[in-house]
Image: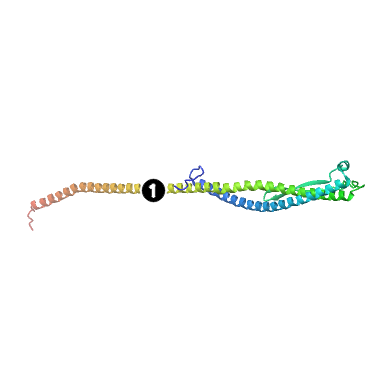
Amino acid sequence: MSGTGARENVFATRMALTNMKLRLKGAQTGHSLLAKKRDALTTRFRSILKKVDEAKRKMGRVMQLASFSMAEVTYATGDISYLVQEQAKSATFRVKAKQENVSGVVLPAFEVERVSGSDFNLTGLGRGGQQVLKAKEVYAKAVETLVDLASLQTAFTILDEVIRATNRRVNAIEHVVIPRLENTIKYILSELDEMDREEFFRLKKVQGKKKKNAAIQNEQAAAADAEAEAEATKQEAPAAHEVAEEEFTGSADLLSSKDEDVIF
């Protein structure tokens, strides 16, 4: 019998067949939409992966320059950490977060906003001012690059998890749900065909039985008519015999009687 694979446990009715067809159509539509979503996410994932690679390379170069700049400041002015800590009253950089929707997936994006008013203008006033200014700009660039890298890395991680989940769903629908529904539909169709054949055979047997009963009734009716006709014939025969005897007696009387002589 067809539909012997994994299938739903349903009764083979036409309503169940309609429901299974609707579910199959929904599963195929969902599979198509998820496949499109997976393709869009994969495309964005690859672009982000390329940007992450570039940002990491850029971060390495920027941090290298920042380390050299800090070494120059230390060589020119000595340790300035205590001066920076004294003048640091508020944050120089603020990070703002926003959201970006990619095929229904919300990806966070971070932006750097530089706050004016805490630029350590008096640091390095006595000596090494040029090295301090250069180090400040290089580290500012490093912070901006680090924030961009964090934004890309966060989006990369989220997309990786979402793509894996989407792939699992697509594979489950393609290899489990759709074949299961198709096997169920095949099973219901085979059962309905079997029921139709059984119904046709039953109707044929009923029709044959009716024809047989009608033929028997016709034979019985014909036999009854013949019997009634024979009975009527039997009843008419004595009456005809009596009439014939009466006619024969009357003719004999006429022959035996003599007319009186008539004198003119």
- What residue is rendered at 13% in x and 51% in y? 248
- Furthest-front residue in view? 75
* Residue 31 in the image, given as x and y percentages of width and height: 59, 50
Direction from residue 31 to residue 245 in the image, left or right: left
Q: Label 1 amino acid? A: Phe
**Nearer to the camera, 189 or 249:** 189
Counting from the top left corner in percent of width and height, residue 258 is at 7, 52
Q: How busy is the neighbourhood of tag 1: few (under 14 within 10 Å), some, or many (20 plus)?
A: few
The residue that appears at 88% across and 51% down in the rendered structure is 130
Determine if residue 144 is in view: no
Q: Which residue is mark 1?
A: 201
Q: Nearer the viewer, residue 69 or 28?
A: 69
Foreground of the two, 88 or 105: 88
- At mark 1, the secondary structure is helix
Please name whichever residue, 173 or 202, is drawn nearer the observer in this view of the structure.
173
Image quarter where the C terminus lies is bottom left
Find residue 214 and report its horizontal and vertical position in percent. Answer: 33, 48
Q: Residue furthest right?
A: 126
